[in-house]
Image (tube, helix red, strand yellow):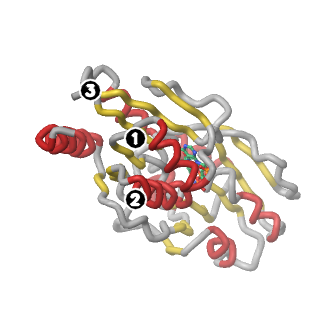
Amino acid sequence: MGRTRILILGGTTEARQLAGALADRPDLDVLMSLAGRTKEPATQGVATRIGGFGGSAGLAGFLAEEKIDLLIDATHPFAARISRNAAEAASLVRVSLFALRRPGWQPVEGDRWQSVADVEAAFAALPQEASRVFLAIGRQEAHHAETLPQHFYLVRSVDPIDPPLSLPRLVSVLAKGPFSLEDELALLRAHAIDIIIAKNSGGTATHSKLEAARALGIEVLMVERGEAADVPAVHTIEDAISRIDHFISVTMKRGV
Ligand code: NAP
């Protein structure tokens, strides 16, 4: 039997970590796929292709053409479209698929979170009076802030927002996690933030803003995840590797 061909849909720390853990395995041929959103993506440790596939049909065609044996959806929990496409494409061309998805954060004692269904609902939940808002939802949906220009906004993103936000009271910060608790406390204090809009992404890299919010008694409008595509999912790199090994042993037994 030849090497097992794996396509990882990436764009997350976990995808990169998984690729790193698989890179030296002689029994695997691993390809990483990135959407191409980040201008200078981190190196992934395995062969990488960049750009969309052209919907689920495009991805299905790619899986067949590249003779992919196993598809792993390790995209961000808020990247819903590509996850849906992955589920459709895999079933179309009968390629095995599982998701590597970090669990969401749960509030603990002292947290002042209000859960909201989406970014629009988060803005609708902002107080009427002018507030000082830390927008930590990435760049794609930040433009909603323009509908409520009475607030001050501190906006953090990895790449610049394009077109730039047109807001009278705006500070933009370009930065990529992981962020330390100390730095998050300093940032929230420096801008006298009184409310945070965040996505329930999970993971450790961007968690410290929530610890800082707890320490300072700051309210968090937490955008929750939509329903995940109905595919088997694991939460850790170790479980992803076990699942890959299981897949290989089953296909070897079947002699495919
Ligand atoms: P999305 O809305 O689910 O996907 C939009 C389109 O982008 C997809 O239909 C697909 O285009 C393309 N695409 C997305 N991920 C891809 C991948 N890994 N490889 C090739 N094409 C991909 O996704 P998104 O929210 O824009 O996120 C884009 C990327 O950023 C993902 O890799 C995700 O893991 C990462 N990311 C997203 C967030 C977030 O909050 N949404 C945060 C951090 C990182 P086609 O239909 O043409 O194939």
Q: Residues within 10 Å of mark 3 (few under 14, many from 20)?
A: few
Q: Is residue 201 visible?
A: no
| Residue that lies at the very extreme toward the left in this rendered image | 253
| Label 2 C-beta lies within 8 Å of the nearest ligand 1 atom | no
Q: Is residue 26 visible?
A: yes
In primary-sequence order, the first of circles 3 and 1 is 3
- The x and y percentages for residue 166 are 87, 56
> Which three-letter amino acid code belongs to the residue tagged 3?
Gly
- The x and y percentages for residue 6 are 36, 36
Question: As drawn, is 64 to the left or to the right of 153?
Answer: left
Q: Which-is-in-front pick, marks 2 and 1?
A: 2
What is the spatial separation of the Cα atoms under label 2 and label 3, in whole angstroms? Answer: 23 Å
Quadrant location of the C terminus?
A: top left
What residue would you read off at disc 1?
A: 14
Instruction: Identify the residue shown where x is 39% and y is 60%.
Output: 105
103 in relation to 236, above or below: below
In primary-sequence order, the first of circles 2 and 3 is 3
> Which three-letter amino acid code belongs to the residue tagged 1?
Glu
What residue would you read off at disc 3?
A: 2
Q: Which-is-in-front pick, marks 3 and 1?
A: 3
Q: Between residues 165 and 194, which one lies in front from this camera angle?
A: 165
195 in relation to 210, above or below: below
Instruction: Identify the residue shown where x is 47% and y is 27%.
Output: 44
